[in-house]
Amino acid sequence: MPTRKETANKTVVSSSTDQPRAAFFPYARYTSVVGVHTSLVAFTALFLPQTSHLLWPHEPTLTDRPQSQFLDAITDSPVVTLAWIAAGLVVLQVWWAGWIRQWCFEYTSRGTGDELKVDRYRFDRSRLSKLGRAAVFTSCVALVFHAIIVLFGAPSASHIPDTLLLATVLALLSAFTPAYALGAPTFSSETSSLVARLTWTRLFAELSPRNPIERALVYPAVGTLAGSWLGAFPIALDSDRPWQAWPLTPLFGGIAGYIAGSLLALVISALKWLAEENIRIQQSEKQKTT
Amino acid sequence: MISREFRLLLWVLCVHLAGIYLFTKGFLLSRLALPDRGACSSDACASLATHKRAVLLVIDALRFDFIAEHPPEPASPFHHNILTLPREFTAAHPDRSFIFNAYSDPPTTTLQRLKGLTTGSLPTFVDAGENFGGSSIHEDSIIHQLNAAGRKVALAGDDTWLTLFPDAFQPNMTFAFDSFNVEDLHTVDEGVIDNLLPLMRHHQNSWDFAIGHGLGVDHAGHRVGPDHPVLRAKLEQMNNLLRDVVAAMDDDTLLILLGDHGMDRMGNHGGASTLETMSALWIYSKIPLSFPEYTIPEVILPMITFPEATVPHRYVQQIDLVPTISLLLGLPIPFNNLGSVIPELFNRDPDGSSLQKAMELNAAQIRRYLDAYRSSSSGKELDAAWSDFSVAWADINGLDGETRLIALDNFTRLALSACRVLWAQFNVLLMGAGLAVIGLSIVAGWALYSKLREVGDDEWEKWVDDKVLWSFNASAVGLGLGYLTHLMLHEYLDGVAMHQTALFAATLSSSFIVVAVTRPSITLKSIKALPIFLILHTSCFASNSFTVWEDRIVLFFLISSIVPSIITGFTAPTSRLRYRILGFSALFAVCARFMAMSTVCREEQHPYCTVTYYASESSSAPPIIALLLAFPISIAIPRAVRRILKISKSDSALIAGAIFWVLEWVDSAEVLGDMGDVLRMARTVLARTTAAAMLIGGISLWWTSPVCLAISNGQSSQQSSASASQEKTEVTVLGFANAFGSPYLIFWLIFLSIVWLMTQLSGQIVLGVRDVHGLNEAFTSNTPSSALDLATVKRDLCFSEVVPLALLAMHTFYGTGHQSTIPSVQWKSAFILSSTVSFPFSHVSVMTNTLGPFVLIALAAPLLVLWNLPPLPHPKSLGASALRAGIGMSLYFSVLAFGAAVFAAVLRRHLMVWKIFAPRYLFAAFALCAVDVGVLIGVGVGVGRVREEIVRVFRAYLGRNKD
């Protein structure tokens, strides 16, 4: 638990930012959605590929190193596994990003009741166009990721669908949600796009999120990339297992990193919130007594 | 002349050399060679003799499948089913002709194999290095036994035999030919044909043992690989030779045909892979040797299947030949022999009594040898296995018939396998001493590196002088201390020589003193700056699979190591700077990836690796694309450099390097038929002229007038500054900002062109790609901090800037067609400066080829601090920063070498130690020396000279201005 002194310092810092001090953030709902979301991501990664065995009867292959049927379903064809996971994640991320966008709106919108109503109407109406833009942006990021993965040493001439699907999954996990919630950064010179660019730079280059929503965006994204970077390590091992096939280890490393990042964001946001609540209560008590 | 940087770096080099020397002495195997000679009590040996004479025909690198009846599927049209004589005879006369798949113990180099083949012992790894020099055999061997029995030995072929047995052959029957001219496919073979056949046909009675050793097959393998029509022609020629030899044999002659080792898919050898160790063996006699009345128990006739073949085949150890030939000729078995007799050749009586007798003689000889070894000075090694020997020996007694044969075989094979394990005779004391020296030198290097940053601009020269003085004094004291220690403790220091103790004490104490007087402080900052990639890279050596895949891992780390600068790029304040950093980083990454496309594969990387450095898996010719790109790149590099510097003198040298290798390709492809000699001449002349011109001309020109080479900077800045002072206006001075960087780059280019000459075409392209973009850009992109504050003169070098450079050195090493294995050394480059192996030239060119990437990048390290550094106001700390860059570079590689040494020492009983860990340690040690030398030349000589000259020029200018 953080000591009182630290929390006091942090309160001072957070109150100096431009965010309203007692901005509403639905921690209870956030917690439950994160729980459901991460469980579903894990389910998508592990159990969705099993459907191939249900649809197409599986004939056990005789290999030197037998493994369980569960793993077989994942390792039989990496492309099919990747396709299942990518398809599952599209649904999951749209759902999750919808929540984040919603909270983002609630967190930042202020004004009178009528203004709020207009804002909400605009917000609801722009949903589809925003979704389209985020999709386009995510595909661009996927292409960039593909290039980066090849730069890191992935085969450049073979395994192109594998690498591209891996890049898509990583882009879905890391770039889609921020693009939908914050708006994708563009190169235009309007003020709004400049603000978007600066926000993206602050979040993903300086890695300094300031509120629970930003944490829920940055931590999983960083976790995904770090996880898939670490996931490349077991490929070199010479144990010759089917699960070492490209790109299964970076894929599962990335998903694990995403889940870990999501949970970490939840824990840190919750701790901060508890600490702030504590201080607020103490201060109000002090005011009462004086 | 000898600057203080030079002295300090020289000290670093010496300490590293001492550490490497001590560790290597303790780590690389040595086996005690006993001087005893084998003898037979009565006529026991002679009673088993069947032949008076023998012909030993060695076809170098004759792999088992070349003569196999059932070659691998699918059979190659170039080397399978061509040398068919042995199998024809075996099919016709199974009692006279025997084909075996013979295991040749690694290292599979000719010299070691000949030692093994004649003595029956197991040559050790350290011998591999002597292949160029050779050394005579003093142990007992077949040749010694033949000489002792007064039999005459004739030789035709490879002169390695003469280096092993300088005075064993009849002078009038010795026809030796040079063995190391790999490009010469025919001289040695024709020498064998022209001299061996007349001996057999006309002088049957003047010799008792004739050796023919042809090298054509081996050279064809090295030069063009096994899948080439040249090898087919060679094997056909050998088949005809065999036919003639068999025709010239009489009934008293035994013929032994063998390959001293195999060859890998590329046609190279030296390692321990299956293809290298499976050699062919064929024994033929005109009188029946084997009578099928007695059935030999199958347990003592092991079988093995050649990779991808369908039928298993009889499998023996190559050293089994030693007792077999000895007994068939009626000689005592050589004393050190560990081979077992080949049972089929002694199967003569219905009850197997001859076989039993042969095996008993064999077992008794091995028992004698083990006893003698145990009572020798290093007999303790056998302690662990001794009880097993005793049990196996006791088992023999009391048994009879088949079971006795099995027990005898069991004993001899146990002795062989136990000795194979045991002759890892590590000297743990020396290994520990070496590790301590290297380890402490890392601490000292780090202390110097981190303290140099804190020492002020003005004091650093004095500070360095101080440290150098301390270190040299301390090593002198240490030398004395070590001497005294050795006198007092020598009985406890097992196997440690006097000079080794002294060396250890001297280097250890001087490193210790340097650490003590430097007093580095460990702060939170220094812990946070912990080089994560260096740690990860070093820990790779703990695992065989990570060591095997190091080439890919280096690329992975190299790209990862520039991620921080990309992130910095996004946060850069101005968009110009942002695009610049991002653009250069991207270019750097793309270049690194392109370099990674050029690979050679180690055996362990199959099947996940394809060779792109050569035209195909089993060839050593450059791919067509390399031929096409070599010239454009060699022209483009000077252009690019000229664009940056507007001056260059090295374009002709680069083109000459490319011409050399194209000529080589033309020659080996035999495009022009008989032009061989002329081309060879032209190549040698070209190579020597280029090397000499670059070395002597380039360096002397640069030395006498670095400012002349930097004239565009120096003069233009002078002129424009002069005009500026007249007109009293500010003028942007061309070349002023980079006054230190550009002359140093010219200096670096001289070395580039030499390494370029030594590198094969594909490697040249890799070097080119790296040079044209990678390197120069690396300096800019990897120093975003410096790009951010160009105005500040004092530049702080972080270790994270050195890491990409060091990784780039490793990456270039792998990109230029190298791997950390002995067979992947490009021996072809030995013939750049001369057409045969001659002492300094071949060694120097192979070293340059292999270690060039390290030297080059180490030389480039000072550019990290020199690049874009304006000369005015005079940067006083320039020398200190350059020194730090040099020490940082050397630190990275000393940690790598330390890691490789530690893991090689810890895993010294690992199955893969001689295949993976020991070669990796050797390459790490060589790389460290190369980097130290590069840094020494770069920082000690290059930077000092540039600084001196620039100070001179600007002092003159300032002086004139004042007037």
Image (cartoon, rainbow, N blue to C red):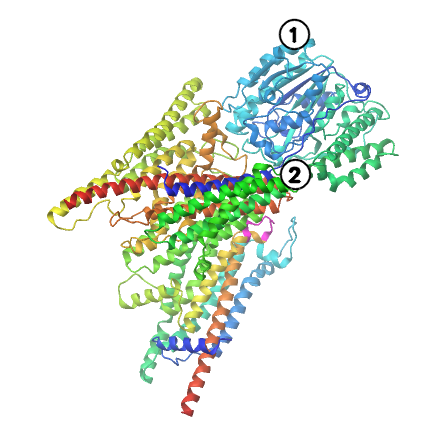
Residue B287 visible from this viewpoint: yes
Residue B268, labelled with which disc? none
Residue toward you, B86 or A159: B86
- Tell us which disc is closer to us: 1 or 2: 2
Q: Name the residue beneath numbered marker 1.
A: B202
- Position of residue A286 measured from the top left corner of the image (x, y, whole percent): 42, 88
SS type, badge 1: helix
- Name the residue at 84% across, 37% down: B395
SS type, badge 2: loop
- Answer with mark 1 or mark 2, whichever residue precedes in sequence: 1
- Name the residue at 55% across, 29% down: B226
Residue closest to the far top:
B202
Q: Name the residue beneath numbered marker 2.
A: B425
Q: Which chain is indicated by disc 1?
A: B
For the magenta stretch, what is the residue range?
A234-242
Say what amino acid the circle numbered 2 marks: Gln
Quarter of the figure with the C terminus of chain A? bottom left
| Left or right of residue B907, residue A134 in this image | left
Residue toward you, A10 or A248: A10
- Position of residue B119 measured from the top left corner of the image (x, y, whole percent): 68, 26
- Position of residue B711 measured from the top left corner of the image (x, y, whole percent): 23, 38
User: Is residue A236 on the magenta stretch?
Assistant: yes
Distance from the alpha carbon under mark 1 to that under mark 2: 49 Å
Say what amino acid the circle numbered 1 marks: His
Q: Are marks 1 and 2 on the same chain?
A: yes
| Left or right of residue B610, residue B563 in this image | left
Badge 2: residue crowd in 10 Å (few <14, some 14–19, many ≥20): some
User: Is residue A44 on the magenta stretch?
Assistant: no
Asked which quadrant contains residue B355, the reply is top right
